[in-house]
Amino acid sequence: MTVYRERLWAAPWMFIGSALIIPACIIVFAPINMTVGIVSAVALYAACVFGLVVGSPTIEVTDEELHAGKAHIERRYLGASEAFNGSEASLQRGRLLDARAWPLIRGSASGVVRIPILDVNDPAPYWLLSSRHPSELARALNDRLG
């Protein structure tokens, strides 16, 4: 059963910024054929939006596992999670980040959750996951530890 689920959508500015492909494509094709330019521009922008939507990872906590993007781990191997916001989250993503940690960082989510890994065979000491709702994610993970 799913306890928590969050999709890390791209930030709105990514969709707006990728829209700049529309005038660029029209400018390139206008001297040849305006219709081709418009059709190409719309198709390329649609491909950009598709890539942003499909490439958005999902974080899902079930009774048995934690899924973060394409990675997953059984909850019995997870320690007590900590949620960070603001400058604390920036420190966790930057200066305090262990090079061995497994990160799922997205700039569109300001908070992070640090999840210690208790499996001695796992080379990552912890996972660091971006989240728009880090307190809720940490609560869902800590609700029933392993």
Image: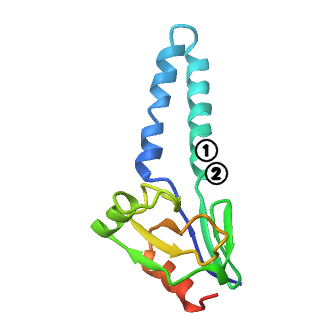
Residue shown at the point (49%, 80%) measured from the top left: 81
Q: Which residue appears farthest toward the top when viewing the image?
A: 31
> SS of the residue at dot 2?
helix
Amino acid type, label 1: Gly
Label number found at residue 17: none
Out of 82 and 57, give the one closest to the viewer.
82
- For label 2, the residue is 54
In the displayed structure, does residue 102 sit left or right of residue 2?
left
Out of 130 and 108, give the one closest to the viewer.
130
Q: Are marks 2 and 1 in contact (CB under 8 Å)?
A: yes
Residue shown at the point (41%, 61%) measured from the top left: 97
> SS of the residue at dot 1?
helix
In the displayed structure, does residue 125 sit left or right of residue 70?
left
Residue shown at the point (38%, 63%) measured from the top left: 110
Dot 2 crowding, Cα within 10 Å, few <14, some 14–19, many 20+: few
Residue 76 in the image: x percent, y percent? 66, 84
Quarter holding the N terminus is: bottom right
Image quadrant of residue 60? bottom right
- For label 1, the residue is 51
- Residues under labels 2 and 1: Cα distance? 5 Å
Give the mark count. Answer: 2
Residue 42, compared with residue 118, is above or below; it is above
Dot 1 crowding, Cα within 10 Å, few <14, some 14–19, many 20+: few
Residue 56 in the image: x percent, y percent? 58, 55
Q: Which residue appears farthest toward the bottom when viewing the image?
A: 144
Quarter holding the C terminus is: bottom right
Amino acid type, label 2: Val
Residue 144, compared with residue 20, is above or below; it is below
